Amino acid sequence: MTQLVTETEGDQRGNKGLVRAAVAGATGFAGQELIRLLSRHPNVTITMATGSQATSTPRRLPSLSKIWDGTVVPLNAAAFAADAVFLALPEAASAELAPVLLASGLRVIDLSGAFRLRDDAKRAKFYPATASLPAGVAYGLTEFELDAIKSARLLSNPGCYPTASLLGLLPLQRAGLLKKGADIIIDAKSGISGAGKAATGRTHFSENHGSVAAYNPFGHRHTPEMEQALGQGVTFVPHLVPLDRGILSSMYAHLVPGTTAAAVTEAFERAYADAPFVRVTGDALPEIKHVAHTNFCDVGWKVDEATGRVFVVSVIDNLVKGASGQAIQNFNVMYGFDQKTGLL
Ligand SMILES: NC(=O)c1ccc[n+]([C@@H]2O[C@H](COP(=O)([O-])OP(=O)(O)OC[C@H]3O[C@@H](n4cnc5c(N)ncnc54)[C@H](OP(=O)(O)O)[C@@H]3O)[C@@H](O)[C@H]2O)c1
């Protein structure tokens, strides 16, 4: 693990927050979003912000000037003063750091995939740096895991594609409306920030602008995460689209014979009756612009009763509901705050 860098000046607002929160990976896309959101959270004092060892000279975050004017500085481990630590790190770094923080009695909210998969063989394949799951880990798809999240010591925040896709499929699966053994196709499009701040040949502006590309069919590491939650296989194909942020997931599934459109509507409305961040839109199909820069997931659908098929479409902002916003929603549940605190 590289050294942590810390910010010890405390919350620049002078707010007497109840929970001291630290953000590791604060210079990344998800980490900066965390700082932006946490800085206005009424029950949080930001006590630490970190970057990687390679670029660990003290620095400000210019885009957050006058929102959060703290400094990202090298860690003095002895001064790691926090109650909860958000990890917005590459998964290998999370796999190494989280157990150390847990052993010190801190609660950890990890945005990486390091602790999402329960199956040892699948975890070894997709997240080889995570040798085992620490005690007290909970999968943080907030709308479906509230009880486990409340008592979590290590909150494993879902992936961005799984967040959008599972929120579109789980209401049908839980209501027993999906035909057993029939394939589910998940065709999802993501903006480029989903790949993090380091440009690659695929994510470079000149490559991506004006193009759309499928990548990693069958082999994406979010496939086992979705299959774990659904309890069945899926055909998942992600695509990169020339947007800076946002995910749109189009899902195609077969219904139990005889399922009506009204039964599908009832399943969605019942599942999200008390969910502050899921908006069901029925056959008014949602689009990314409706949720960009928010913690909302909008879910729409269309049923073809004649053939027993359902089309579901869900949209999120990958950096908010797909990462930092959902992490804070989970933090709120863990600490007994209203889910909406700091997010609306
Ligand atoms: N982007 C998304 O839409 C999204 C959605 C859901 C989940 N996630 C997950 O969230 C995590 C962060 O994603 P991101 O997109 O924000 O990544 P990113 O933009 O690449 O930022 C990575 C952050 O981690 C730091 N870092 C890199 N290597 C490190 C190391 N070895 N030790 C300590 N710190 C290190 C970087 O610091 P420097 O600035 O010093 O390099 C930076 O602050 C990843 O695990 C990702 O899979 C991302």
Image: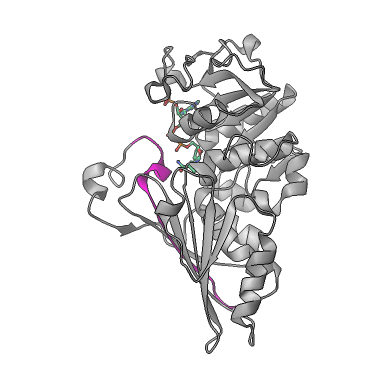
The residue sitting at 73% across, 21% down in the picture is 104
Tell me where the magenta segment starts and ends, as one range: 180-198
Residue 99 drawn at (x, y percent):
68, 29
Residue 178 visible to an observer of this rendering: no
Residue 178 point in image, percent of width and height:
63, 75
Q: Residue at x 63, y 35 (%)?
A: 109
- When the figure is inspected, residue 141 is found, relative to residue 249, above or below; the finding is above
Q: Is residue 182 magenta?
A: yes
Quarter of the image containing the N terminus?
top right
Relative side of 321 to 198, left or right: right
9 on left or right of 172: left
Is residue 233 magenta-colored? no
Percent x, y for residue 323? 53, 42
* Residue 17 can be seen, yes or no: yes
Q: Quadrant of the C terminus?
A: top right
Which residue is most to the bottom?
A: 306
Q: In terms of image quadrants, where is residue 7?
A: top right
Image side of residue 274 versus residue 53, left or right: right
Q: Is residue 239 above or below residue 47?
A: below
Q: Nearer the viewer, residue 1 or 282?
A: 282
Instruction: Name the residue located 47 percent from the left edge and 58 percent from the top edge.
Output: 219
Relative vertical location of residue 45 with respect to residue 112 in this rendering, above or below: above
